[in-house]
Image (cartoon, rainbow, N blue to C red):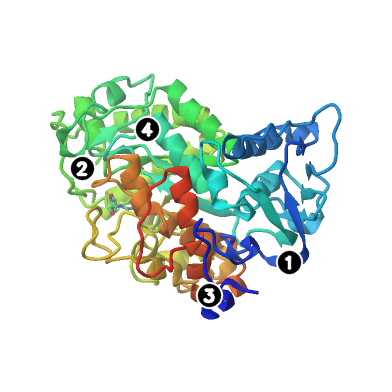
Amino acid sequence: IAAGALLAAGAVIPASGEPAASALDTVVPAPESVQPDPESEFELTEQTAVLAPAEAAEVGEYLAGVLRPSTGLPVPVNPAMPGTGDIALALDGDADLGPEGYRLQVTDDAVTLRATSTDGLFHGVQTLRQLLPASIESPSPQPGPWTMPGGVITDKPRFAHRSAQLDPARHFFTVDMVKRYIDQVAKYKVNKLHLHLTDDQGWRLQINSWPRLAEFGGQTEVGGTPGGYYTQQEYTEIVNYAASRHMTVIPEIDMPGHTNAALSSYAELNCDGVAPPPYTGIEVGFSSLCVGKDITYTFVEDVIREVAALTPGPYLHIGGDEAHSTTDEDYVAFMSKVLPLVEKYGKKPLGWHEYGKAAPQGDAVLQFWGTTPGDPLLNEAVARGNKVLASPANKTYLDMKYDENTPLGLQWAGFIEVADAYGWDPGSYLQGVPEEAVLGVEAPMFSETLETSQHIEFMAFPRLPALAELGWSPKAALNWESFRNRLAAHGPRWEAAGQDFYRSPQVPWA
Ligand code: TNX
């Protein structure tokens, strides 16, 4: 029986706050296929162990780490004497699950999770935890019972690239804050973390060949409060933590605009040789690297070389947005010199869609951030073979206010309620961009107004799960009524985890 049917019949929701419906009906993102088996139910007990092959031991430990704090159960991984009632992970999944898919089977005696890769197992673990009561997300011991409904879920993503973005440039976020967000979005099968590491207000990554970028250019932030930066070791710690959550970091060095922090750190990067003061406001479009100076390209190459060396993922984001103080001719000249540098250091370029003006080569990706679905630059890009990352600002920008009463955020792209974030199809929304040319979906979150983890959480939840579902679930499963009912069951999960969220009036919170 579906959640909606029970509620319509006036069923009483238990005082625990747990929805009476099967947890199989509340998974977000919606799986490709769910076959309930109402006759069976699995219960975690003192005897439950996680069994994992050596190559997947890391996912096994992660799963045990999810289960132990709230259940207080021992949940050993690969004990010497496995008994009955275990959770088994296996890498022998069917080839049609693809690189990230999984099959999760829950019976009375066992839970079996199969995939072709550890990425698939990790995503399956995120589904598995959603089948347990909301209190599984608590950091401290809670009363059980810890049951999961029987059935089989077969699942794989619609799009390969599902990213969340953070902007530690406008307000600096500590390594721990970044890790906290990584954990929160991994639950919704996000697999990329885009870090906007530089902007007018701050340079947030240590660059050994240009040390003043971080040491001077990282000192402040929006509003004039102290900023900060990641040492290369700290950046590596973020990259490794993301990898442990099966997420790839995409670093962004924004250029030629959004560069006041660099220009204020090194006078020689300015056309007039004069360093501007640090900037702590929130205007955009006033700064530009000096396109005609040779030293500009020495600088850019040094930065790209160091960032590429620190970054295992395939992409390096070079920004390119809002270069309002760079002429079009200069912009194209600049990008034409910089694009080959990205390739020289073994990375594929990613950039905001304006950089399509420089006709980047076929493996470059354009990140669309416009507010109307058509742009000739996208059509030209598709014709060249470029892929498009969809992040239309009026649908995906998590820094936009929900409505006129939202205390945080901006509104230049309009208000974005949960239904707005959910109400578009990434495969057909962008005019002239067929689904095959869509690499995936991103949820950016610029942080002119966001300073704390609580702020980040309030803006991201519940819109991030909406966008994650658009990136993961089959088109046929996208349905607002279904989504809002499933989403309702996630409020108690976030509460149990001690995570903030916006209690949107559009969602029938459990
Ligand atoms: C536009 S989106 C920007 C950012 C701002 C953001 C605020 C984009 C490519 N550029 O510089 O922070 O709006 O929402």
Name the disc covering residue 300, or none.
4
**Residue at image mark 2:** 287
Q: Nearer the viewer, mark 1 or mark 4?
A: 1
**Height in image: 460 above or below 64?**
below
For the question of whether residue 340 can be seen, the reply is no
| Kind of residue indicated by mark 3 | Leu
**Left or right for 481, reference 265:** right
| Kind of residue indicated by mark 4 | Val
Q: Residues within 10 Å of mark 1 (few under 14, many from 20)?
A: some
| Kind of residue indicated by mark 1 | Pro
Tell which of 506 and 321 is nearer to you: 506
Q: Nearer the viewer, mark 1 or mark 3?
A: 3
**Height in image: 1 above or below 116?**
below
Which of the two discs, 1 and 3, labels the residue nearer the N terminus?
3
Secondary structure, mark 1, is: strand
Secondary structure, mark 2, is: loop
Name the disc covering residue 7, or none.
3
User: Can you give x and y, in whole percent of width and height, for residue 28 in the image?
Assistant: 56, 60
Residue with the most extreme bottom position? 9
For the question of whether residue 412 can be seen, the reply is yes
**What whole-number distance in Å separates the C-alpha atoms at marks 1 and 3?**
19 Å
Q: Residues within 10 Å of mark 3 (few under 14, many from 20)?
A: some
Secondary structure, mark 4, is: helix
Which of the two discs, 4 and 2, labels the residue nearer the N terminus?
2
User: Can you give x and y, in whole percent of width and height, for residue 87 in the image?
Assistant: 76, 43
Residue 362 sits in quarter: bottom right
Q: Nearer the viewer, mark 3 or mark 4?
A: 3
**Residue at image mark 1:** 36
Residue at 33%, 31% (x, y): give it.
Answer: 204
| Kind of residue indicated by mark 2 | Ser
